[in-house]
Amino acid sequence: MPAVSGKPKAGKGKTTIQTLIFPKSSFTKAQAKKWAKDHGHKVSLEETGSSYRARQFNPNTFQSGSLRTIDLGSGVKAVIGKPKVNKEQVYKELVIAINNISNSLSSQLRQHLKD
């Protein structure tokens, strides 16, 4: 399987597609690539005995035990899971939120002192 870069976005209770699965009985390789592209997914395919697979993210970037397969309709299946929390991103978002609150409170205090 080719290397897949990037990390899925983590969110509370949200799942992300890890891999798309296209059965060979319903899709040619070209049709699988077109479906993935038309639906905004990565199109690099791995061929197995019975399917074409379009890996979106490395399975190691998902929480242990969270991966499961669902039916998307039209013969397409997807392996979905809950991404691991990116602690660095959470920290950055918390710092931004704290700064926004601090700025808002400072502004309110200045306004209150003027009155």
Image (spheres, rainbow, N blue to C red):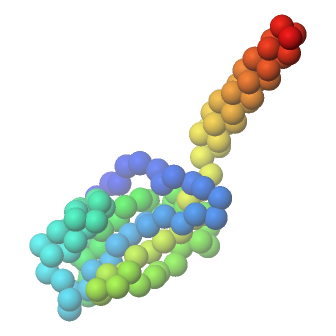
Residue ranking furthest to the bottom:
25
In the rendered image, which quarter contains the N terminus?
bottom left
Left or right of 77: which side holds 60?
A: right
Q: Residue at x 58, y 63 (%)?
A: 14
Left or right of 58: which side holds 64?
A: right
Determine if residue 4 is in view. yes
Left or right of 40: which side holds 60?
A: right
In the rendered image, which quarter contains the C terminus?
top right
Determine if residue 95 is in view. no
Q: Residue at x 59, y 39 (%)?
A: 89
In front of the other: 114 or 4: 114
Question: Residue 81: percent from the left, percent from the top?
Answer: 53, 69
Rendering quarter of residue 37: bottom left
Question: Residue 17: percent from the left, percent from the top?
Answer: 44, 67
Residue 97 versus residue 37 in the image, above or below: above
Q: Residue at x 52, y 78 (%)?
A: 68
Rendering quarter of residue 55: bottom left
Rendering quarter of residue 42: bottom left
In front of the other: 110 or 69: 110
Residue 11 versus residue 89 in the image, above or below: below
Residue 108 versus residue 32 in the image, above or below: above
